[in-house]
Image (cartoon, helix red, strand yellow):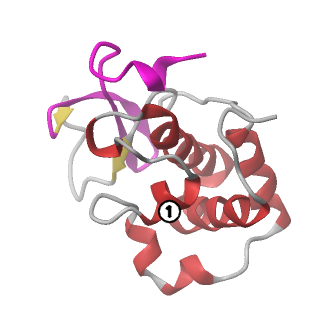
């Protein structure tokens, strides 16, 4: 049982997303992207109010993931990526994306302390991760 419901197709979509967004960042980088997607389903706040499925979170427009607009996203998921996606759906969380709802890759320099009024949770390789406060978005902080 997972922390969010995921059909086989949604697990495949999540696996494709984590590869397309963070393959160059290795397994942990891909797990962090998976955490963000799962957190968006759990959150029900801010930009993600009413998001109930991984499909909705991944293809949300506006505000979804950039990778869905690129051809690489639409290639078949590999078994290793599906295994990483499954870990995220099962509730495994990894810092700095533990409660993060956003990430981005700055073109130059470090991670700003805030991004769109959300706090920096940390950086992993080239991506900066941002999370809301628990008072603003309690859903993402639930066990």
In the picture, the quarter occupied by the C terminus is: top right
In the picture, the quarter occupied by the N terminus is: top right
SS of the residue under disc 1: helix
Within-10-Å neighbours for mark 1: few <14, some 14–19, many 20+: many
Residue 24: image x %, image y %?
56, 62
- Which region is colored magenta? 116-143
Name the residue rendered at 34%, 23% in the picture. 137
Residue in the foreground of this view, choosing between 64 and 21: 64
When the figure is inspected, residue 114 is found, relative to residue 24, above or below; the finding is above
> Furthest-left residue in view?
117
Tell whether 74 sits left or right of 125.
right
When the figure is inspected, residue 143 is found, relative to residue 16, above or below; the finding is above
Residue 23: image x %, image y %?
60, 62
> Furthest-bottom residue in view?
71
Residue 119: image x %, image y %?
25, 26
Tell whether 107 sits left or right of 50.
left
Residue in the foreground of this view, choosing between 65 and 42: 42
Report the label total.
Answer: 1
When the figure is inspected, residue 124 is found, relative to residue 118, above or below; the finding is below
Residue 124: image x %, image y %?
47, 40
Name the residue rendered at 77%, 47% in the picture. 86
- For residue 142: magenta? yes
When the figure is inspected, residue 116 is found, relative to residue 135, above or below; the finding is below
The residue that disc 1 covers is: 21
């Amino acid at each position: 049982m997972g922390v969010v419901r995921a059909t086989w197709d949604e697990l495949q979509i999540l696996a494709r997303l984590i590869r397309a967004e963070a393959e160059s960042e290795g397994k942990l980088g891909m797990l962090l992207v998976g955490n963000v997607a799962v957190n968006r389903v759990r959150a029900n706040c801010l930009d993600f109010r009413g998001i109930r499925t991984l499909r909705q979170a991944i293809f949300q427009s506006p505000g979804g993931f950039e990778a869905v607009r690129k051809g690489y996203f639409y290639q078949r998921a590999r078994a290793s990526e599906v295994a990483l996606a499954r870990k995220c759906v099962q509730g495994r969380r990894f810092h700095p994306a533990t409660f993060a709802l956003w990430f981005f890759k700055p073109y130059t320099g470090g991670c700003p302390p805030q991004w769109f009024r959300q706090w920096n949770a940390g950086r992993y390789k080239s991506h900066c991760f941002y999370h809301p406060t628990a008072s603003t978005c309690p859903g993402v902080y639930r066990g």
